[in-house]
Amino acid sequence: MALMITDECINCDVCEPECPNNAIYQGEEIYEINPDLCTECVGHYDKPQCQSVCPIDCIPFNPNVVETKEQLLNKYYRLTAAK
């Protein structure tokens, strides 16, 4: 699954620089996560870094974007090969 940011976001800006895939960006009202770039930090870290630093826990898993660890790892390989 990709992650998502809920409307409880306070725009504190701590999650954006933690994302190794640059999947987090400032939306119209709150920060958002591009599910095409989110690997839940698979390939980079043991757990999602944005969730680790969020002071209000507003970054749950996105139930609309379900992916296996293998799919996330393949996405990681595809994203990092392009760099």
Image (cartoon, rainbow, N blue to C red):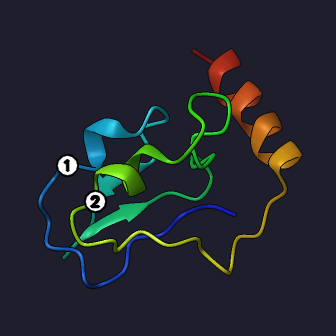
Asked whether 39 or 34 is in front, the reply is: 39
Residue occupied by mark 1: 14
Asked whether 64 or 14 is in front, the reply is: 14
Question: Which residue is located at x 27 percent, y 37 percent?
Answer: 17
Type of amino acid at the residue the image marks with label 1: Val
Asked if labels 2 and 1 touch by Cβ distance under 8 angstroms, the answer is yes
Q: Which numbered marker is on residue 54?
A: 2
Type of amino acid at the residue the image marks with label 2: Cys
Q: Which comes before the other along the chain, label 1 or label 2?
A: 1
SS assignment at label 2: loop
Side of 22 where 81 appears, left or right: right
The CA span between labels 1 and 2 is 7 Å
Give the x, y percent position of residue 67.
80, 60
- Screen quadrant of the N terminus: bottom right
Question: Which residue is located at x 65 percent, y 29 percent?
Answer: 79
Side of 49 where 2 appears, left or right: right
- Looking at the image, residue 66 lies above or below residue 70: below
- Looking at the image, residue 13 lies above or below residue 32: above
Give the x, y percent position of residue 3.
54, 64
SS assignment at label 1: loop
Question: Which residue is located at x 51 percent, y 48 percent?
Answer: 48
